[in-house]
Image (cartoon, rainbow, N blue to C red):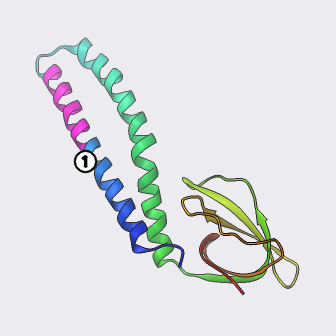
C-alpha cells in the first residue's frame, strides 16, 4: 500500500496547524474591521477591508487550500473503489498539477495493446522500475494506490 497512517497523521497535523494560524489571523482581521466600523471610520474600514482582506484571501488560497485538498485526496484513496490493471511499464511523463495534487503520469500497456495512464503522487518517491517490466497497478480512479512488480 502506497499510503500509510503516517501520511494521514502528517497531513492532519499540517492542516490543523494552518487552520489555527488562519483562525487567529481571521479573528484579528474581524476585530480590526469591527473597531473601525464601530467608530464609523468608513474610509478606513473600506481601505482595511481591501488592503487586509485581499492578501488574507490570497495566502489562505496558497497555503491553506493545498493541504486541505490533499487531505480530501488521502481520504478518497483510503475509502475509494479499487481497480487493478496489469501491463508492461512504459515510463513516467513530466509532472503537473491535477485536481490540486502534483502528479506524474505513468504509462503501461496491457496484454491487448491498450495504453493506460495512471497518476503517481509526487509526494511519494518514484519507484525504480525499468521499461518493459510487467507490473500490477491498483488505482482509485486514475490515481495509483499501490504498485507491484509481477
**37 in relation to 97, above or below:** above
Q: From the viewer's perspective, tell me whether residue 49 is left or right of residue 94.
A: left
Question: Which corner quadrant holds the C terminus?
Answer: bottom right
Q: Residue at 67% x, 53% y: name it.
A: 95
**17 in relation to 116, above or below:** above
* Residue 141 location (% of width, % of height): 61, 72
**Residue 47's quadrant in the figure?**
top left
Q: Secondary structure at mark 1?
A: helix
Is residue 31 one of those drawn in magenta?
Answer: yes
Q: From the viewer's perspective, tell me whether residue 124 is left or right of residue 94.
A: left
**Residue 93's quadrant in the figure?**
bottom right
Q: From the viewer's perspective, tell me whether residue 49 is left or right of residue 76.
A: left
Q: Residue at 73% x, 72% y: name it.
A: 129
* Residue 6 location (% of width, % of height): 39, 69
Which residue lies under the disc numbered 1? 20
> In the rendered structure, which segment of residues is drawn in magenta?
23-37
Determine the main secondary structure of the stretch shown in magenta.
helix
Amino acid at each position: 500500500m502506497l499510503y500509510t497512517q503516517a501520511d494521514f497523521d502528517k497531513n492532519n497535523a499540517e492542516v490543523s496547524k494552518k487552520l489555527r494560524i488562519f483562525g487567529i489571523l481571521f479573528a484579528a482581521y474581524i476585530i480590526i474591521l469591527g473597531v473601525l466600523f464601530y467608530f464609523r471610520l468608513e474610509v478606513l474600514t473600506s481601505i482595511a477591508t481591501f488592503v487586509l482582506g485581499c492578501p488574507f484571501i490570497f495566502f489562505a488560497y496558497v497555503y491553506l487550500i493545498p493541504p486541505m485538498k490533499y487531505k480530501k485526496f488521502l481520504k478518497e484513496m483510503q475509502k475509494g473503489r479499487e481497480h487493478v490493471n496489469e501491463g508492461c511499464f512504459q515510463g513516467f511523463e513530466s509532472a503537473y498539477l491535477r485536481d490540486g495534487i502534483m502528479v506524474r503520469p505513468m504509462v503501461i500497456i496491457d496484454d491487448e495493446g491498450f495504453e493506460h495512464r495512471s497518476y503517481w503522487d509526487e509526494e511519494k518517491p518514484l519507484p525504480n522500475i525499468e521499461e518493459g517490466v510487467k507490473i500490477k497497478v491498483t488505482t482509485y480512479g486514475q490515481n495509483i494506490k499501490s504498485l507491484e512488480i509481477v
